[in-house]
Structure formats: C-alpha cells, structure tokens
Image: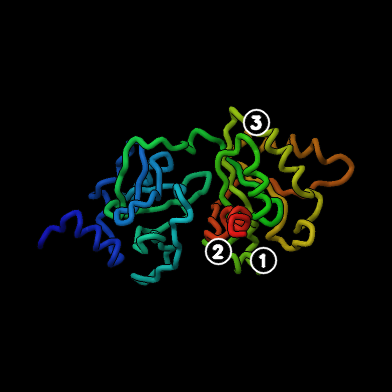
Amino acid sequence: MKTRTKEEWRDFIMKENGTEPPFENEYFQHFEAGIYVDALSEKPLFASSFKFDAGCGWPSFFVPLDEDEIIYQWDYSGGRQRMEIRSKTSKSHLGHVFDDGPPPTFLRYCLNSAALKFIPEQKIKREEEFKSIVLAAGCFWGVQKKLDSLEGVERTLVGYTQGRRSFPTYEEVCRGSDDHVEAVLVFYDEKKIELAKLLDFFWSIHNPRQKDGQGVDVGRQYRSGIYFMDKEQEQMIKESKSGVEHSEKVVTEILPAKAFYFAESYHQKYLDKKMSSL
C-alpha cells in the first residue's frame, strides 16, 4: 500500500472530506506557541492558546481564532450525525466539532492536522490569561455592542446556550422549543476590569426584572441570565444581584455555564457590520 505524502493527505482530507489516523498526525501533541492557519488559504483559524489535550488523537481546540472563517454543516456520513467544520475561504473540510470540551465553551473542535499549517511565535492575545463569563440580556446584537465598549473586555462572541438541542440554528432558537437563550461569551482581563464592575454594567444595560424578554423582544430566548464558570464567580454574582434587587424581584437566572454554540457568522459583531455598510 502506497504511503501518502503530506500534500496527498492534505488533498484527501480537505478536498475529499477524508480523515487522518488518530495519534499518527503532526499536531495532536503539538503545543508550541503560535497560530494554526488553513493549509490551503493560510487564513488564521485556531491558536495554541485555545488548544487542549482531548485524548482523542487529533488536535483539539475550544474556540476558533476567527469565527467568521468557520462554516458549520451537518455531516451524515458513516451512518451517524456530526457537525462538520469547513474553511470559509478555501471551502475545504477541516474536521468536526463536538459538545464535550472544556469551559468556557464546552466545545471540542477536532481538526485534521493535514488541514492545518502552524505559524510559530505569533503575537496574539491568549484567552487563557483572561476570565470568561456568559451574559444574556435580550437580543445579543445590542448586548455585544455594549459589552465591547468596556475597557478590559478583550473578546466577545454571540451564541446560544442553556437549551436542549445541540448546535441549534437561529431559526430554531427563535421558535423557543429548546429553551436556548441568546447570549454573549465574554473574555475579560481582571487587571483592567473586575467582575463586580462588569456585573454592574450588565445590570445597567437591560431590565433584569422583565421575565422572558427585553422591551419589545419577548420570548424565552431573550431572557436575562448569567452563566458562571466556577463557584467563586457564582458567589460574586449572587452578591451583585442582591445589591440591585431592592424592593422589586430580579428574575435573572444564575446557572452554571453549559455548551456555548456560536451563532451564525452574520450575527457576530452584527451592528458593527451594519454600520460599516452604510
């Protein structure tokens, strides 16, 4: 049996939707600092700071470096249903994503090494140096825009969480049948903004006393919620909530973070894109 060259593996995976063997590929135990780019287009896709050892035999990440470069589509090959991830620019197969990863997203982006090219020592912000929390306060377009204005908020991503369906679409969330909520995953630098200050801002940008909606946006998907990563955060959130409750009950739900499914790319930074197109 002829052994494939590196280029042949790349073409087999990216152009023919193939899969390389686990534990026998270039990057599954590679943790050098840098970024991983599309092997064809060389567009940045993932960073070493988002990488973790999943024990599955393929390079695994908990969040993309550039969400706009990832296309999601259901894959029914092999008699099972999986969420495939493809490169937007090269329109090529990369791997699959599963909801059994670590916080803060609880996702595992499982990539084929041959679909990637590693660029060492890039100067990128390292998300593991930041804290993370998930906030819901109505339509995520405006919430993301407001949170991005805060000094110390280093990155935000909009998506769906707390529901029953894996990898829901916007239309499915809008139907409200799976109890997902529109939310924002926030990475923040504690050296620049403390959680208490971030929570004060959160209370100020919406009405935490309105049940299942915000203003004219009514439905469970628009409910107020804070989803924490650890017990320390939970305690601080409850203390912050008690400070704003006063005479009228705050209905904001406070729950452990669960799988965070990224919203479609057109939702990311939606208002910024809208303004730039005018």
As drawn, is 232 to the left or to the right of 81? right
Give the SS element for disc 1.
loop
Three-letter amino acid code of the residue under disc 1: Gly
Mark 2, residues whose alpha carbon is within 10 Å: few (<14), some, or many (≥20)?
Answer: some
Residue at mark 1: 176
Three-letter amino acid code of the residue under disc 3: Glu
Q: Say which of marks 1 and 3 sits in front.
A: 3
Q: Residue furthest left?
A: 1
Mark 3 crowdedness (10 Å alpha carbons): few <14, some 14-19, many ≥20: few
Quarter where residue 236 is shown: top right
Image quadrant holding the C terminus, namely: bottom right
Residue 54 lies, with reference to residue 10, above or below; the image says above
Query: Could you say which disc has been placed on residue 66 in the image?
Result: none
Q: Nearer the viewer, residue 141 or 62?
A: 141
**Residue 231 in the figure: left or right of residue 107:** right
Q: Residue at x 43, y 51 (%)?
A: 108
* Mark 2 or 3, nearer chain start: 2
Residue that numbered label 3 is attached to: 194
Q: Are marks 1 and 3 in contact (CB under 8 Å)?
A: no
Residue pointed to by mark 2: 168
Where disc 3 sits, the SS reads loop
What residue appears at the point 79 percent right and 58 percent down from the top-left corner? 215
- In the picture as drawn, the residue positioned furthest to the front comes out as 278
* Residue 246 in sight from this viewpoint: yes
In x, y percent, where is residue 164?
Answer: 58, 61
Q: Is residue 125 above or below residue 20?
A: above
